[in-house]
Image: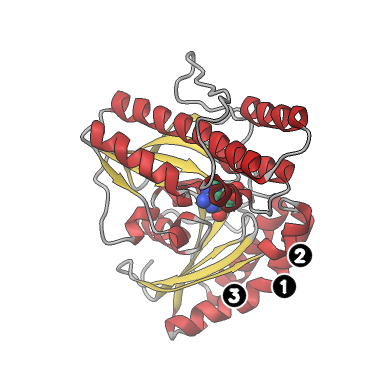
């Protein structure tokens, strides 16, 4: 980026977001419009609805981000946009908008990997992790472990073979009749439950120690609920606490193994599931035992946002990485 401000746009799932960042990395605005109310009746994200809502929201959200930054389009020197992974119909809205705007302004546009942006989110905070670090990205769409050696030097260590951790929270909540998104609903119900009440399975996958699988756990919960028949309030609290403990055990233990194997001194926890207080507490214990440091961005930077897209976009533009006008959206991670 030679001059001006960076405008970042995020539309990969169910948040329409825009942010403005200065050339030195200072965050000038950060606007997120969540569609959670539109998807709640369906118990999950409906891709067609997501695309339509992005189309409606993208102009007002970008305008709000410019306003908050006290900027106009003439101040924009570059555009960063999430290119993937995510829902293609949703990504295309942000990508087309970003390319059209960059073309009209005659400024460069850079395409950002959403998962990569999540793992750099701690750099939006004052306290930065030292390289190299191990990052656990746990959200509704992804559960993966990465070795982050530099801003643009990232290695995939392992990922989920089936459901993402957040997706498992959302599906279990649906079975229990708890509102979407399931993560906060289950975490709240779990407060009155006993995490040791029901022993649900923990898939440790010894052959691939850094991969995850949550579908067996999800099925075990559904089977338990069906066998039980009617559940009283205490049953629901116990299922939630026991399920949450099983997910947390696996996420924590695999992160420990990855961090030990990579011999890093720092662990980053990011993505929407990082908002889970039980997970953060257990991770804190783990890093303490291992003499490592834990970095968890504030909840706003853990869930989907455009500030993290701006940060990675700025790193890419400084290294001369821009996207051609034919840059296309991709649904799955490229690593
Ligand atoms: O990162 P995010 O906002 O969007 C995606 O990229 O998916 O993550 C949303 C996911 C949802 O599955 C939601 O249930 C989960 O994060 N989540 C939580 C909590 N808060 C949100 N999971 C567990 N505990 C929470 N407190
Ligand atoms: Zn995300």
- N-terminal of the pair, mark 1 or mark 3, is 1
Q: In which quarter of the image is residue 280?
A: top left
Q: In which quarter of the image is residue 12?
A: bottom right
Locate residue 247, reporting x and y percent: 52, 34
Side (left or right) of 268 relative to 309: left
Q: Which residue lies furthest to the top in this view?
A: 207
Q: Residue 56 carries which label?
A: 1
Q: How far apart are marks 3 and 2 (CA)?
A: 14 Å
Q: Is mark 3 on a helix, strand or loop?
A: helix
Q: Say if mark 1 contacts mark 3, CB within 8 Å.
A: no
Please report the residue visible at 32 percent of the width from the left and 30 percent of the height from the top: 259
Q: Which mark is residue 61?
A: 3
Q: Is residue 230 above or below residue 178?
A: above
Q: Which residue lies furthest to the left in this view?
A: 291
Q: Mark 2 points at which residue?
A: 52
Out of 84 and 272, give the one closest to the viewer.
272
Rate crowding at label 1 as few (under 14), some (14 to 19) or many (20 or more) other CA atoms within 10 Å.
few
Rate crowding at label 2 as few (under 14), some (14 to 19) or many (20 or more) other CA atoms within 10 Å.
few
């Amino acid at each position: 980026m030679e001059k001006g401000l960076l405008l970042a746009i995020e539309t990969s799932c169910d948040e329409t977001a825009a942010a403005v960042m200065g050339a030195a990395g200072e965050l000038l605005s950060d606007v997120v419009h969540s569609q959670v109310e539109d998807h709640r009746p369906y118990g999950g994200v409906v891709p067609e609805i997501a695309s339509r809502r992005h189309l409606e929201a993208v102009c007002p959200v970008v305008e709000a981000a410019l306003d908050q930054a006290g900027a106009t389009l003439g101040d924009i020197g570059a555009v960063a946009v999430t290119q993937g992974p995510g829902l293609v119909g949703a990504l295309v809205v942000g990508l087309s908008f970003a390319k059209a705007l960059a073309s009209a302004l005659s400024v460069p546009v850079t395409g950002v990997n959403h998962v990569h942006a999540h793992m750099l989110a701690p750099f939006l905070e004052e306290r930065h992790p030292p390289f190299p670090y191990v990052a656990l990205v746990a959200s509704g769409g992804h559960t993966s472990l990465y070795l982050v050696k530099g801003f643009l030097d990232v290695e995939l260590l392992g990922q989920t073979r089936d459901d993402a951790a957040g997706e498992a929270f959302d599906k279990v909540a649906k079975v229990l009749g708890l509102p979407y998104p399931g993560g906060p609903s289950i975490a709240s119900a779990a407060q009155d439950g006993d995490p040791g009440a029901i022993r649900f399975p923990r898939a440790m996958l010894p052959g691939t120690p850094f991969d995850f699988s949550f579908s067996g756990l999800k099925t075990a919960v559904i089977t338990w609920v069906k066998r039980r028949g009617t559940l009283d309030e205490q049953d629901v609290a116990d299922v939630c606490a026991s399920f949450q403990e099983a997910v947390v055990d696996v996420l924590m233990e695999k992160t420990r193994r990855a961090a030990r194997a990579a011999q890093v001194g720092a662990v980053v926890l990011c993505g929407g599931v990082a908002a889970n207080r039980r997970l953060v507490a257990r991770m804190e214990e783990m890093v303490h035992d291992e003499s490592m440091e834990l970095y968890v961005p504030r909840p706003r930077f853990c869930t989907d946002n455009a500030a993290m897209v701006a940060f990675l976009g700025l790193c890419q533009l400084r290294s001369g990485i821009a996207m051609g006008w034919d840059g296309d959206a991709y649904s799955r991670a490229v690593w």
